[in-house]
Image (cartoon, helix red, strand yellow):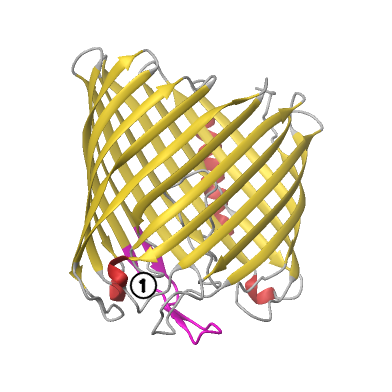
Amino acid sequence: MKPRLILVCAIGVATVAHAAEWRFEPVVSFSAQDNSNVFLVDGEPQSDKLASVAVDLAASRRTERATLTMSYAPEREQYQDFSELNNTSHALRVGADWRFTQRSSWNSSFSWVRRERATLSFSDTAQDLVALPRTQYDTLAASLSGTAEQTQRLRWFWGAAAASTRYEDSSIATTAGGLTLEDSQDIGVRGGIESDLSATSRVRGELRVNRIEEGARGSRDVRRVLAGWTFGRIERVQVDISAGAAFSKLRDTGELVNVEKTSATDTVGSVNLRGRVGATGEMSVGVSRDVTNTLGISGASLTDSATIGYRRPLGRFSELNFGARYADRTPLDDNESLARTKTKAYRAEYRAAFSARWALVVAAEKVDQSSPASSSVTSTDTVPAIDYQIFSLGLRWSPLSRGG
């Protein structure tokens, strides 16, 4: 998107915000950053300083039966020494929730993201993007889900989701000799039933079916059967447990895949805990094992992951945030042409607010990605080891904020 189109989007969102039922919440962030590995490569990393300007244009509309949210967030990065890395990333998201009747509701979402490098999520245990050498990529994602109450304690739920990632460059140079990136798609449907055991406890059963396509790294159908239990209150401590099995079947080996078996059965599941810490602190902890796609980077994998997040308000407007993530990805079906990959990531942010509208933001991020020496790899087409740190100091401006 060019600056003119960005301005048009901003004017469009601001126009609808004049309606009384809309709420407009723009945020502008300025930051100076120090990046220890701007090219995201293994060996002889180059550091640089950069300036970043990010705008988050968010609007929401709420009625008695529906909620609509929209946001567009462009970000411009300007480097001091390596101007060839200057770039503008984009993120557009639209979501809607609406209740048809007293016993049925629907939820839909759409997102488009364009970036120069992959990033990790510190809160979503299902997202395990791998840090990559810089290359532009676009990701489109859409979902639709619904629930229907059969009785006061019994509910049915269902959903469908699709995500597609496309790369600007299909091959990038690395110290390992090169890495081929493949356009990827992940399409899935799910359905199940949930029943309340008490006011603070419920159980569920669920079936999920996915098709993961990663170009020359193959195509697989994945079926999951899961049972889950949720108990506790979010105001104190709430625990969500799920366990089951994933049945994976290879549909197409692709040019880069050489496997000895075409199907696999793996135990999968997750444990997530959310709750209060002290009077104002909030913490979330999660561990999971699942069959995931890797956005056409290293082939469908069995991924063990763990996340932890902590948020604590400090005073009226200030707050402290911390997140950490660990992921261990093992290619399916004993695929020796692809490497096992481990990723560790940490991020801390302190927002020292002067008022409801202005805040000083200090942040630090570290990512360490590696392939264990024990991996039996027969191809140089593997995910490179990457280690980088980012320190940033900036200002956050919320011109329409009223402190809540």
Q: Amino acid at mark 1?
A: Glu
The residue under label 1 is: 182
Closer-to-camera residue (151/204)? 204
Picture coordinates of residue 54 (x, y %)?
65, 51
- The magenta region covers 164-184
Picture coordinates of residue 339 (x, y %)?
42, 74
- Quick one: which residue is furthest to the right in this view? 354
Q: Quadrant of residue 107?
A: top left
> Is residue 2 in view from this perspective?
no
> Is residue 237 in view from this perspective?
yes
Helix, strand or loop under label 1: loop
Q: Residue at x 49, y 87 (%)?
A: 177
Closer-to-camera residue (190/360)? 190
Is the residue 366 above or below the residue 67 in the image? below
Is the residue 378 above or below the residue 298 in the image? below
Picture coordinates of residue 273 (x, y %)?
49, 33
Query: From the viewer's perspective, is 218 left or right of 23?
Result: left
Is the residue 146 above or below the residue 137 in the image? above
